[in-house]
Image (cartoon, helix red, strand yellow):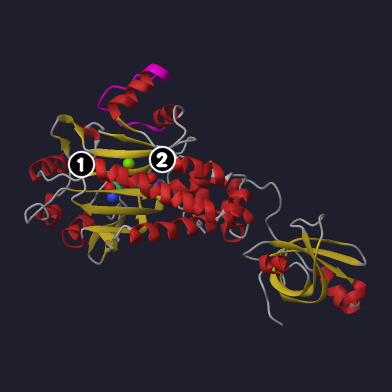
């Protein structure tokens, strides 16, 4: 007996097939048992009749519960009434693993489904999201390989902050203490002086005190850093990356997007449009004129402001030149306008907000020291980083993409928790 996937069996369309998977739905009478079987590729209706399999076996079939695992052999045929248009008339089957009464039934609360995430992960919705995520990450790897980048991995245990001390996770380190990575960036900046163009994707940790639908405590950041790139080059490169990855993913995952009621053609269209770049000052002007929100120069854009701003765009946009005052220590002042930093965010449409943060990198050691001291940092932990400016520094830039934010946007999920298999948030680190 050679097993095929359900998808392959349906492609064959007729004749004898053997498939294996898990019971997605079941119902029956005294003579017939209908089982919808699920595997990683699709679902299919299977009909077991007492007449065909005999009384003894039929008794076993009758007892089969949702999520039992089974091997099924039979004749496949087209049937318009079946959930995926095909049906298997079962000639033989085996129950591989019985199932207790499955705790997940219809209409359960999001909290219950998070408690049962280890089981809910089997749902068709999460399966589709995980396939889209996988396709996206694979496309991204292709993109960076084509662009001549080298993959570079940095430590996860780091003695220094990158994005502000208030969201660091502290870790006991023998007799000392250290932190979980907030970003790959500072170490990437060491490596660009040999490898020049590098990228990676790794777990990133932030002790976020916000319980929003956009924040995780552990997420995957996909970063890049390149020697010789200035702000303009890096923002255009960021657009190119996201456009490539979203188009490839939409083309490769049409069925998964359909399952999530998302039209992949719309995503492809967005990827083919021009994505605007505006300055922070223009953004606050739009907010003032069109949304009647008065933002003073000097404040970072909050979620509400990002959302209001994005009501005026149907593609992602890049916002550059945020006020230096509220930006991380490594973001340089614009020599043409000292109040502004040479940095950018990319914002996604449809209320998904910031998906990328990046910048050119400062070469002004004294100013970086001043900023870090203001934040109460021990400068001695950053001496290695300042060294990078002392031995043949060159202009360089980079950015980080929040993978879950991008996946949530592409999938049309209203919560970032649906874009990662086992979400960790301020309120949850289990299961
Ligand atoms: O804007 P951020 O903080 O930028 C950095 O960490 C830079 N050091 C990256 C770099 O230049 N190499 O984070 C980058 C992106 C954000 O735009 C957002 O998409 C995502 O990471 N992100 C989060 N995603 C989920 N949960 C959180 N708590 C996140 N914090 C940031
Ligand atoms: Mg940011």
Mark 2 / mark 1, whichever is N-terminal: 2
Quarter occupied by residue 57 = bottom right
Compared to 203, does 278 lie above or below? above
Disc 2 and disc 1: Cα gap in Å? Answer: 24 Å
Compared to 14, does 395 lie above or below? above
Q: Mark 1 points at which residue?
A: 331
Name the front one of labels 2 and 1: 1
Quarter occupied by residue 100 = bottom right
> For residue 163: magenta?
no
**What number is the disc on residue 210?**
2
Residue drawn at x 35%, y 19% as measured from the top left? 294
Residue drawn at x 63%, y 46% as measured from the top left? 109
Q: Residue 311 in the image: x percent, y percent?
A: 46, 28
Q: In this view, does 34 lie to the left or right of 100?
A: right
> For residue 300: magenta?
yes
Q: Residue 169 in the image: x percent, y percent?
A: 32, 53
Residue drawn at x 36%, y 58% as measured from the top left? 201
Q: Residues within 10 Å of mark 2 (few under 14, many from 20)?
A: few
Front in this rendered view, residue 126 or 103: 126
- Magenta stretch bounds: 289-303
Front in this rendered view, residue 401 or 186: 401
Mark 2 vs ligand 1: CB under 8 Å? Answer: yes
Q: Residue 229 in the image: x percent, y percent?
A: 21, 48
Compared to 314, does 405 lie above or below? below
- What is the total number of numbered labels drawn onto the structure image? 2
């Amino acid at each position: 007996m050679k097993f095929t996937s359900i998808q392959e069996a349906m492609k064959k369309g007729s004749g004898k097939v053997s498939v294996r998977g898990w019971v997605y739905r079941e119902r029956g009478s005294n003579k017939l048992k209908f089982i919808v079987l699920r595997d990683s590729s699709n679902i299919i209706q299977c009909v077991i009749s007492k007449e065909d399999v005999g009384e003894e076996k039929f008794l076993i079939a009758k007892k089969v519960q949702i999520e039992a695992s089974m091997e099924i052999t039979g004749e496949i045929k087209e049937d318009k009434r079946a959930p995926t248009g095909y049906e298997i008339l079962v000639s033989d089957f085996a129950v591989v693993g019985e199932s207790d009464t499955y705790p997940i039934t219809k209409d359960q609360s999001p909290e219950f489904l998070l408690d049962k995430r280890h089981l809910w992960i089997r749902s068709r919705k999460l399966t589709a999201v995980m396939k889209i995520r996988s396709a996206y990450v694979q496309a991204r790897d292709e993109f960076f390989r084509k662009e001549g980048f080298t993959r570079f991995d940095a430590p996860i245990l780091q003695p220094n902050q990158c994005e502000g001390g208030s969201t660091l996770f502290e870790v006991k380190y023998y007799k000392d203490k250290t932190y979980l990575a907030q970003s790959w960036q500072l170490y990437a900046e060491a490596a660009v002086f040999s490898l020049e163009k590098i990228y990676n994707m790794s777990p990133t940790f932030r002790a976020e005190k916000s319980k929003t639908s956009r924040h995780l405590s552990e997420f995957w950041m996909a970063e890049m850093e390149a020697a010789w790139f200035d702000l303009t080059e890096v923002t255009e490169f960021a657009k190119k990356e996201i456009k490539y990855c979203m188009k490839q993913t939409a083309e490769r995952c049409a069925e998964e997007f359909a399952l999530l009621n998302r039209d992949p053609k719309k995503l492809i269209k967005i990827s083919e449009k021009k994505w605007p770049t505006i300055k922070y000052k223009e953004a606050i002007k739009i907010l003032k004129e069109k949304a009647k929100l008065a933002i003073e120069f000097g404040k970072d854009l909050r979620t509400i402001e990002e959302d209001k701003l994005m009501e005026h765009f149907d593609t992602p946009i890049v916002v550059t030149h945020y006020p230096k005052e509220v930006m991380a220590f490594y973001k340089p002042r614009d020599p043409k306008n000292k109040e502004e930093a040479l940095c950018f965010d990319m914002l996604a449409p449809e209320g998904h907000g910031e998906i990328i943060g990046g910048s050119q990198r400062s070469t002004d050691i004294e100013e970086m020291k001043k900023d870090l001291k203001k934040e109460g940092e021990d400068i001695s932990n950053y001496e290695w980083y300042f060294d990078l400016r002392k031995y043949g520094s060159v202009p360089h830039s980079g950015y980080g993409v929040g993978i879950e934010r991008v996946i949530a946007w592409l999938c049309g999920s209203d919560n970032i928790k649906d874009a990662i298999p086992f979400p960790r948030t301020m309120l949850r680190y289990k299961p």
